[in-house]
């Protein structure tokens, strides 16, 4: 049996300087499932500024192995200090549930302002 110990929110490779000065990167939201059927939804963004969501999804699969991983969509996160904005979608996986994603980020970063921007 696999225990799902993957963090709900992963911001891989983010430097304090980038957070303070501001940047944007792609993210994915995925469902992890263990062999008992237990599941967990997670947010993953990597600050290497990869333009494709499939890279982030592959990182989730690599880190979460041997769990089953299903991508639920993705978008772009814009970060400037304590303000996080979610927008857009993934060409590979479609859009995520932005309201659910924003709630995940608010739980992880209660002192930050998280918004959903529709363009």
Image (cartoon, grey):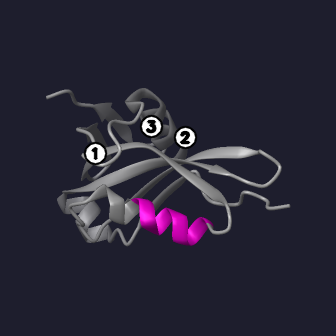
Q: Which of disc 2 and disc 3 is earlier in sequence? A: 3
In the rendered view, tell whether residue 73 sits above or below residue 53: above
Quadrant that contains the C terminus: top left
Q: Quadrant of residue 74?
A: top left
Q: Which of the labelled discs sits on residue 101, or is there none?
A: 3
Where residue 34 appears, as percent x and y from the top left, is 74, 54
What is the CA distance from the residue labelled 3 to the residue labelled 1? Answer: 14 Å
Q: Which of disc 1 and disc 3 is earlier in sequence? A: 1
Q: Nearer the viewer, mark 3 or mark 2?
A: 3
Residue drawn at point x = 42 percent, y = 27 percent: 99
What is the CA distance from the residue labelled 1 to the residue labelled 2? Answer: 23 Å
Residue drawn at point x = 42 percent, y = 35 percent: 102
* Relative side of 63 to 113, left or right: right
Find out whether the residues at labels 3 and 1 contact each other: C-beta distance under 8 Å: no
In the rendered view, tell whether residue 90 sits above or below residue 44: above
Which residue in the protein does label 2 denote?
107
Q: Nearer the viewer, mark 1 or mark 2?
A: 1
Part of the protein shown in magenta: 57-64
Whether 63 is among the magenta residues is yes
Which residue in the protein does label 1 denote?
90
Where residue 115 appears, as percent x and y from the top left, is 31, 32
Q: Nearer the viewer, residue 106 or 44?
A: 44
Q: Which of the labelled discs sits on residue 50, or is there none?
A: none
Q: Which secondary structure lies at badge 2?
A: helix
């Amino acid at each position: 049996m696999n225990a799902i110990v993957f963090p709900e929110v992963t911001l891989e490779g983010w430097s304090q300087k980038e957070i303070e000065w501001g940047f944007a990167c792609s993210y994915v939201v995925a469902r992890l499932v263990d062999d008992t059927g237990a599941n967990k939804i997670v947010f993953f963004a990597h600050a290497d500024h990869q333009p494709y969501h499939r890279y982030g999804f592959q990182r989730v699969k690599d880190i979460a192995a041997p769990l089953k991983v299903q991508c639920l969509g993705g978008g772009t996160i814009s970060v400037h200090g304590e303000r996080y904005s979610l927008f857009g979608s993934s060409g590979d996986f479609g859009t995520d549930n932005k309201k659910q994603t924003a709630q995940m980020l608010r739980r992880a970063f209660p002192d930050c302002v998280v918004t959903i921007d529709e363009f």
